[in-house]
Amino acid sequence: MTWHVLGAGSLGSLWAIRLARAGDAVCLILRNSTRLSAYQAAGGLRLREDGQLIFQPIPAELPDATTPIRRLLVACKAYDVEAAVASVASRLAPHCDILLLQNGLGSQQAVAERWPQTRCIFVSSTEGAYRQGDFDVVFAGQGQNWLGDPRDTTPPTWLGALAAAGIAHQWSEDILARLWRKLALNCAINPLTVLYDCRNGGLLAHRTEVLALCDELGVLLRVNGQPDAAVDLAQDVLRVIEATATNYSSMYQDVAAGRRTEVSYLLGYACASAARLGVVLPALTALRQRLADHLSHRGLPTD
Ligand code: NAD
Ligand code: KPL
């Protein structure tokens, strides 16, 4: 069974290289012929880890190739996911597995609702990778991948392939709780690092504000039916701030590089769900507005 990888960026390359290295069949799907030519010129994907370079000449094709897709790994940014899956929709075999690697919430549900004949597996990843060039990726942080399917808690038969490829993973019977918890952590940390122009550790100087956000995020998790994800949230947020004190958050890095952020799937999703449920969360709402002002001031999309 071939792993088709849609989105050959940081995480997509990290997964593709490890699977190919373990002997699995992998095929990259690149968005257009310009990207395909650039990839062919590069000759393959490069991954750097602990000073070692791994090169894998993984085959690549365009979305309109005709081979059926039975297992699709979607590693685009959340805002690109629906269009990317739509570009290969005619090739999705019935009961095809789609692994969705996005941060936040919203993009995964959109795919699961639009292509109900597929099995959508949501992945929450704490691994870290970044691109140092086209098709050239650095594995920057070991972590864990939690996989789960909110519609069916039976694990897929191919989890062993991830183990064989050295991809740290665990099947989760409550993947939504994991994704909500991570969303809450990201909402409490990432926007403030952008607004205060600081590393994660810089937020220790804004502890009162962080704790006020955690209170509202706890309410949000509970009204969304995720009470377990709310347990000890503030302690966890402070722990993550301390453990990642010298890091810049992913949103900070996006803004600093002039890239679109995934705010609609993080703080935007949080505020939209509160509004839908009629819950008033003033600190989160104000934070979203301050972030939107900041982004538009820098000429970046606010969604
Ligand atoms: P990235 O920007 O490095 O890669 C995304 C890739 O998708 C790009 O190569 C882009 O060209 C490609 N793409 C976009 N639209 C496409 C389309 N229609 N067809 C084919 N390819 C398309 O992004 P990333 O850092 O790998 O992040 C992917 C997701 O994983 C995000 O939601 C991110 O929040 C999440 N995530 C990333 C990390 C990390 O360390 N990079 C960690 C945890 C979670
Ligand atoms: O996941 C993160 C990110 O930067 O996106 C952490 C380190 C938890 C900060 O929110």
Image (tube, helix red, strand yellow):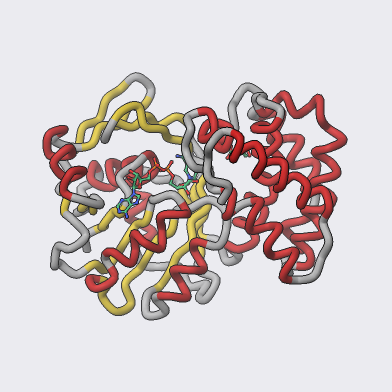
* Point 69% across, 32% down: residue: 195
Residue 26: x and y in percent read: 22, 52
Q: Is residue 238 or residue 295 the one in the foreground?
A: 295
> Image check: 56 left or right of 242?
left
Quadrant in the picture for residue 72: bottom left
> Image check: 298 left or right of 166?
right
* Point 29% across, 53% down: residue: 5
Residue 125: x and y in percent read: 50, 47
Residue 109: x and y in percent read: 51, 68
Q: Is residue 208 or residue 56 the one in the foreground?
A: 208
Quadrant in the picture for residue 238: top right
Residue 239: x and y in percent read: 73, 35
Task: Please say if 171 is above or below 12.
Answer: below
Q: Where ligand 2 lies, by image quadrant? A: top right
* Point 33% across, 67% down: residue: 86
Tell me how many marks there are.
0
> Image check: 140 left or right of 44?
right
Q: Is residue 155 or residue 266 the one in the foreground?
A: 266
* Point 26% across, 57% down: residue: 3
Which quadrant, please, contains the N terminus? bottom left
> Image check: 89 left or right of 156?
left
